[in-house]
Every structure is written in C-alpha cells, then in structure tokens.
Image (tube, rainbow, N blue to C red):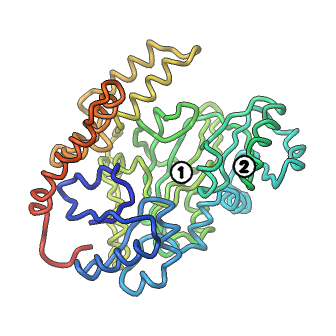
Amino acid sequence: MGVTRSAKGVGKDSRYCLKVVPVSSAHTEIIETILAMASQYRASHLVATNEDFIVLLNEHRSRLESSLQLLFPPREIFELALHKDQTIRIAEASGIPVPRTVVIRGIDDLPKCKDLRFPLVLKPAHGDIRSALKFRALYIHSYQQLQYEVTKVQAVGEYPLIQEYWNGSGIGVEVLMSHDVPVMLFQHKRLHEYPITGGASVYCESMPLHSRLAGYSIELLRAMRWDGVAMVEFKFDENTGEAALIEVNGRFWGSLPLALHAGADFPYALYATSLGRAASKFAFKRTVRCRTLAGDTKWLLATLRQEKSSKLRAVATYLAAFRPSVRYFIWAADDPTPAVFQFLRRLGSVISKVWRFPFPALLKRMSQKVEPVRAQNSFREGPLH
C-alpha cells in the first residue's frame, strides 16, 4: 500500500498493490495519513523511493519512528548524498577520484574555472534547486558560454556545480550497507541513456563486480556512515581503466528491476537486515539486459536527430533489444497491468494532442473499474510490511 501526490505512477495498477491513498501537498496531512494507515493495517516498516519525499519524511522522523521503522537514512546522513558538493568533499578526503570540480558562490568566482578543461558540465548542487535551474546537466564548451549560463541563473540565488566532463561508460555499483558492513553488491553498465548526453539509464546490463569500483563504493558509504541501499555512480574509461565518481543516489535507483531480474533482491534484503536477519548471499549468475521501452524509444529518436550519429547502428541496436532474453523495467507476465496501462496512457496522450479526444479521462474510468477486483485479489490477512 502507499500514499501518492501524483496520479502518474504505475505502482497503483499492480495486482500486488493493496491500496493507494492520494493526498494533498500539505505536509501535516501526509504524515497523518501515513500514521493512520500504519495503524489500520498494522504496518511495521516505511520505505520511500523519491528524494523529495524522503526529505519530507525526515522532517517528521521522530514522530514516524514512534510507529514505524524507517528504511532510509536520517536527514544528516541522507543530505550527504543529496548535496553533491558534500559527496565530492567526502570522496576527495577518502582518496576516491572525482572530476575536477569548482563550487562557486557568485559571478565573481567564475575566474576559478579558467584553468578547467572544456567541455564542462553544470549540475544542480542538490535536488532542491533542480526545478529552479530547469536542467539536470548542461554542457558548456567555452568560457564565454559558461559566463552566459551562470549569469542566467543568478536570480535562483544558488549556483550549480561546475565539473570537467569525464568521458566513459556509466557504471552503477549498488550496495546495501548494514551497520558498516556491505551486505549485498551489484553492478550494471548503462547501454543507453536518456537524455543521450547523460541521463537516466533506459537500457542496461548486469556485469561482474569491478573490484576497484566496489572498493570505492564501500569506502565512500562507510565514510558517509550510510545504512541502507544506495547506488554509487561512476564514469569508467574502458581505454585507460580510469574511473571517476559522479554521484550517489541514496535511494532505490531507477534500474532496480535489472538487479531483481539478475537475482539480487535488494528490497527483501533491506527488509531482512532491518529485522536482524542475514540476507542471502548474492552469486552473480549471467549477464542480464533490461530496458524501459518508452525510454529506449526516446533514446532512439534523440539519437536519430543527431547529425553525427550512426543512424543505422542506432536502429539496429534498438531492434536487437527486442530479443526474448531482454527483460523490462515494468512488464511482468504475472502482473501485466502496470505496463499495459502505462502504454495506454502514453498512447492516449498522443491521441489527445492530435485529435483532442478525451482519452485520459476514459482510461482513468477504466482503471477505476478494475481497482476493486485487484484490491480484493491481493488482500492478505495479518501484518502488512
């Protein structure tokens, strides 16, 4: 069961979802709703997968902990991952390589960037200013462009991090830490990202642990006093063997389904360790590939729009991913409804824009009709965790 402030999520369509309770943006109402549901369903644990929501819940942590065990770090630790400048500071102190980074407090600090190697990447220093800056990553190719872009964000009151661009493959090392001990580790490589200049993984594959990257990840999380799950993201240059830390996602990551398909059940392991149980040792099986069809399609279209891209190769790679062995982020044979309704929503959005047909409203009524059956089938007596 869960609470949500958005009707766009696919979790509510799952046959395993007992109940979804929409709430307003009022913080007190959200906390009251969670506590009421915990009492009604005898819930014992609370997990959150959204950074903004974790920040909100941490503001009321003492009250929530009177009824629930929270499966995410407290505010002072979580913010070490949320604020990229703090993550970089800890990594540098731990001897973990990072791209050359400059933190500026105003326009007058820009001369500090003159000896950086272009291209540069501008990134929000933390999630609180991402929407205000209106970008997740902005690529800069000259000092004049840097001056122009930084001047544009003066009104925000905070400035982005300025980093040298690091060439290489995106590698994620996922770790479950429990009392300073790495309980489960998993590693994946990003095959396709959207946006294509560097963004979320839309097609990825599992891979054996790289001992050096795994060591960096454990050392960094120990320095942060981390307890719980996190994904430590690197850029890895396969030609030189050099790597650099990009960021730490202090929550369940978007490509979690890949780990699950490969046999690394992080959600259950997190729950088990919270009870003091030993999580089962994860043995790497074989290379597993996983994609989100909508995101991979966006990757294809964006790649085809690039003048210098190999269009034939992009199409061939996209089509090859339809082989039966490739898994999907959302689609599951025993629970197809989330994937089906996501497809219908996206199709309906296109239909509505082109023909102005109220497809989303029709789809919402369809979803509401199947919900009572789904809730009844998935209800189980006893404590709900």
Contact between marks 2 and 1 (CB within 8 A): the answer is: no
Task: Identify the residue position indicated by label 2 in the image.
Answer: 161
SS at circle 1: helix
Q: For the residues marked 2 and 1, what is the alpha-carbon distance in whole angstroms?
A: 29 Å
Closest to the camera, between mark 2 and mark 1, is 2
Q: Which amino acid lies under the numbered mark 1 shown in the image of this protein?
A: Ser
Where the C terminus falls, by quadrant?
bottom left
Marks 2 and 1, the one that precedes in the sequence: 2
Graded by Cα atoms within 10 Å as few (under 14), some (14 to 19) or many (20 or more), the crowding at tag 1 reads few
- What residue appears at the point 21 percent right and 44 percent down from the top-left corner? 332
In the depicted view, which residue is nearer to us: 112 or 58?
Answer: 58
Farthest residue to the bottom: give it: 66
In the depicted view, which residue is nearer to us: 278 or 249?
Answer: 249
Q: Is residue 331 above or below residue 253?
A: above
Q: Which amino acid lies under the numbered mark 2 shown in the image of this protein?
A: Leu
Q: Is residue 89 left or right of residue 349?
A: right
In the depicted view, which residue is nearer to us: 330 or 348?
Answer: 348
Q: Position of residue 199 (x, y in %)?
A: 53, 39
Q: Is residue 165 left or right of residue 219?
A: right
- What residue appears at the point 59 percent right and 40 percent down from the top-left corner? 236
- What residue appears at the point 73 percent right and 33 percent down from the top-left corner? 140
Q: Position of residue 129 (x, y in %)?
A: 64, 54
In the picture, residue 328 is in which quadrant?
top left
Graded by Cα atoms within 10 Å as few (under 14), some (14 to 19) or many (20 or more), the crowding at tag 2 reads some
Q: Position of residue 247 (x, y in %)?
A: 60, 52
Task: Identify the residue position indicated by label 1 in the image.
Answer: 211
Q: Is residue 78 above or below residue 91?
A: below
Q: Position of residue 143 (x, y in %)?
A: 83, 33
